[in-house]
Image (tube, rainbow, N blue to C red):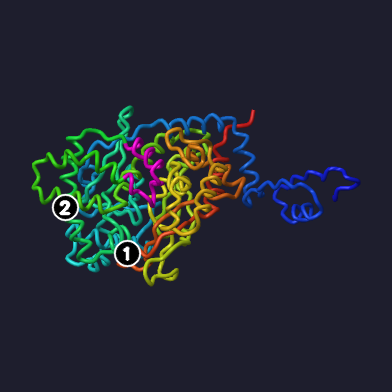
Amino acid sequence: MSARNGSQPPNVISAGLELFADAASEQGAQVRRIDWRPPMPSSEQALARVMADRRRVQANAEALARITSTAALLVDVLPAGPTLGLGTTDFLHAGPPIGWDRASGPLRGALLGAAAFEGIVDEPEQAIELFASRAGYSLDPCHHHSAVGPMAGVISASMWLFVVEDPSTGRRTYCSLNEGLGKVLRYGAYSPDVLSRLRWMSDVLGPLLQQAVRARGPIDLKAILAQMLQMGDEAHNRNRAGTLMWLREVLPALIDSAAPSSDVAEVVRFVSGNDHFFLNLAMPACKLTLDSARDIPGSTVVVAMARNGTDFGIQVAGTGQQWFTGPAQLVDGLFLGDYGPEDANPDIGDSAITETAGLGGFAMAAAPAIVRFVGGEVGDAINASRRMYEITVGEHPMYSIPVLGFRGTPTGIDVTKVVRTQILPQINTGMAGKQAGVGQVGAGLVTPPAEIFVQALTALAERAAPLL
């Protein structure tokens, strides 16, 4: 392999064979390394069947077009009960379906807190008997009600929701209002101060934001998301610019409202002091655009990624409402205070809807400062975004990454590409304590379990169009 008699060294292409590449390089060859891996185990037949589906390419192009073109306008703020048809004992949660018996600590904590908030019990712990009885209440995923919820994602009747609409179709999606960080209900905390904050949000924050949004008129959330990426946010764990841009939109209407000035000042302090406030607007905006791509026969595009603290589930455009689930993974990242890995619950929340739409972990190159929150180096954030282009069907024309030459964010996770490359979607997320009542313990990076993509591929293969 070495060069002889002054001849040019040979050119070698190595596809995933690192030992061979190293040996060739040592002998003087010019080696081009291609990062290649075999498909995921037990996927070959299903992969061949799906790849041969004549509908796939056009179906995925249609899915991407819908995702990137669907509008997402904030049009209202409403109480969850009448809006979603929830009674006092009806509760929604993040992730795929789950019962109390398998619920994680933070989900249980959030449900206990919500029961006390609704007045079903005087103290949160008193609700354990209710939920353990499997009777007298309902428990359903947020996604089944056109809603999303961060972390535990619990929504109950007395909470207020952001209402996001696509004006061309009238479709709407919903999300609760963001409580802030630390010991909050979505992380499974339910102490008296958590419940007091929820009551203030229901009595003051929700109604006042409703007045402001109605007075201001529809707010284009996708326009804010696009600008956020130019200002160092990625719309999952960094929302500083987005929060302040949104507050700028509603601030005049807040000031002009007839509400007591003390209430207005408290609302402004709360929103401006909560860097994550816009997350609960980004999430329903992402869900609305992704829901537009549901039920496209032959499409292999993922339209939802969600976690309930026990299971990680995905839904795919070509397989209807079916969930494909596997065990939620532990997050690798940075811990708060004296907390460590032994204190953390596995991955939880609907907030991975941002990654599903091409934001969050897929857009980390636009927000290099995120590494100070989730760990790693700036180069890791850039490389993560670059790697996601390998498993997506295209780029988002509105969402661009400055450091990558304003290239559109990688959008439209393709089940076939995930299975073929073994590259899993990158998610950045917060960490909840595994014990109910603890709250947030850290933040970091995580990926879905690989087997759920093989499950989805198998289901797609069963629905594949007959070969001609």
User: Which residue: 54% across, 40% down?
Assistant: 460
- Position of 207 compared to 182: left or right? left
Q: Nearer the viewer, mark 1 or mark 2?
A: 2
- The image shows residue 154 at horizontal and vertical percentages of 30, 54
Q: Is residue 288 above or below residue 332?
A: above
Q: Residues within 10 Å of mark 2 (few under 14, many from 20)?
A: few
Residue 167 falls in which quadrant of the image? top left
Judged from this view, the residue extending furthest toward the right is 5
- Residue assigned mark 1: 439
The reply to whether residue 319 is in sight is no
Q: Element under label 1?
A: loop
**Residue 210 x, y percent position in the rendering:** 18, 41
Q: Quadrant of the C terminus?
A: top right
Q: Along the line of sight, which residue is nearer the eye, 447 or 128?
A: 447
Q: Which residue is mark 2?
A: 266
The outermost residue toward the front is 6
Q: Residue at x 32, y 32 (%)?
A: 166
Above or below, comparing residue 367 to residue 130 in the picture = above
Query: In the image, is 186 to the left or to the right of 358?
Result: left
* Kind of residue at badge 2: Glu
Task: Give the percent coordinates (x, y) of residue 380.
Answer: 52, 53
Q: Residue at x 74, y 56 (%)?
A: 19
Q: Which span is picked out in magenta?
A: 221-242
Numbered-mark total: 2
Residues at marks 1 and 2, CA–CA distance in whole angstroms: 24 Å
Q: Residue at x 40, y 34 (%)?
A: 292
Label at residue 182: none
**Is residue 127 in the magenta section?**
no
Q: Quadrant of residue 320?
A: top left
* Residue type (three-letter) at the residue carrying disc 1: Gly
Q: Tell me if 289 is positioned left or right of 80 in this view.
A: right
